[in-house]
């Protein structure tokens, strides 16, 4: 049994790098934590390790046959199995907890899937790796968190108000014409004012347009700051 030649191995590595770069490009365009370089390197390295796992020990079989060894135990799947778990540390680095919400889970899952793209490319399963790349890019590009099919979603909006008896009521009345319907509200007196946390399950606009929508509220004298 002989493995692929050097040229074919190099082509597999190049193809894996291309696939990883395409997945990373979508992430970078959406300004996520891991972009083109990270996904490209992950896919390239996974392909390289898969080549080693599948073909790197063929000389040992030839050596065993030449020296009449009765048994030579090899497990080509061990390196490949290690790849699936080893990517965990990199994926964990893209996950952040902020404002009582979690971000980066999709990017972490994409990195894990990119390992599979590199592995299938290294194994010579070109059709599967091509389909897998297209599938991941389409899913990440279409079914993102702030999408018309899923609704414009936000975890919370934080508002700092003057500590006046009617400040909270005035805030809620000001938000209603803008299309906000808070599903919950927490508040406490802090820093000489009223700190309000509004839970909104559906935003009336895409997340990137939220600042423009809320900008008029900053002109209200009883509102000190707004963040989300």
Image: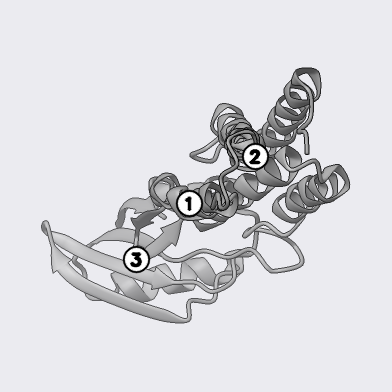
Which of the two residues, 200 or 72, is positioned nearer the viewer here?
A: 72
Q: Is residue 29 visible?
A: no
| Pointer 1 residue | 82
- The mark that comes first in sequence, 2 or 1, is 2
Q: Is residue 194 above or below residue 208?
A: below
Q: Is residue 104 left or right of residue 37?
A: left
The picture quadrant where one finds residue 55 is: top right
Q: Is residue 174 above or below residue 63?
A: below
User: Does the residue at mark 2 contact the one at mark 3 (Cβ under 8 Å)?
Assistant: no
Residue 156 numbered tag: none
Please identify the quadrant where the C terminus is shown: bottom left
> Which residue is labeled 3 in the image?
100
| Residue 36, horizontal then vertical, whole percent | 61, 29
How far apart are the alpha carbons under marks 3 and 1? Answer: 33 Å
Q: Is 207 drawn above or below residue 24 in the view shown?
A: below
**In this rendering, which labeled residue sits more in front, label 2 or label 3?**
2
- Provide the secondary structure element on which disc 2 rests: helix
Please give the name of the residue rendered at 54% of the width and 53% of the height, measured from the top-left corner.
73
Disc marking residue 65: 2
Report the residue at 65% width, 39% height from top. 65
> Would you say 55 lies left or right of 215 here?
right
Residue 162: image location, x then y, percent: 22, 60
Camera-nearest residue between 46 and 65: 65
Q: Secondary structure at mark 1?
A: helix
- Give the quadrant of residue 114: top right
């Amino acid at each position: 049994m002989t493995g692929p030649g050097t040229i074919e191995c190099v082509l597999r590595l190049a193809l894996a790098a291309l696939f990883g770069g395409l997945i990373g490009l979508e992430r970078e365009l959406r300004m996520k934590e891991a972009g083109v370089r990270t996904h490209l390197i992950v896919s390239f390295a996974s392909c390289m390790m898969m080549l080693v796992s599948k073909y790197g020990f063929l000389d040992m079989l030839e050596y065993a046959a030449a020296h009449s060894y009765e048994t030579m135990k090899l497990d080509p799947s061990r390196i490949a199995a290690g790849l699936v778990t080893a990517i965990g540390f990199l994926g964990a680095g893209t996950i952040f907890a902020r404002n009582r919400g979690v971000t980066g889970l999709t990017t972490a899952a994409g990195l894990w899937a990119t390992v599979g793209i590199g592995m299938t490319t290294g194994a010579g399963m070109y059709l599967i790796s091509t389909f897998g790349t297209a599938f991941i890019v389409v899913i990440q590009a279409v079914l993102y968190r702030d999408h018309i099919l899923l609704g414009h979603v936000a975890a919370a909006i934080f508002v700092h108000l003057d500590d006046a008896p009617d400040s909270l009521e005035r805030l809620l009345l000001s938000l209603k014409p803008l299309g906000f319907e808070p599903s919950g509200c927490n508040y406490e007196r802090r820093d000489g004012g009223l700190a309000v946390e509004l839970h909104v399950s559906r935003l009336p606009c895409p997340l990137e347009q939220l600042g423009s929508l809320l900008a008029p509220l900053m002109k209200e004298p009883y509102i000190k700051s707004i963040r989300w």
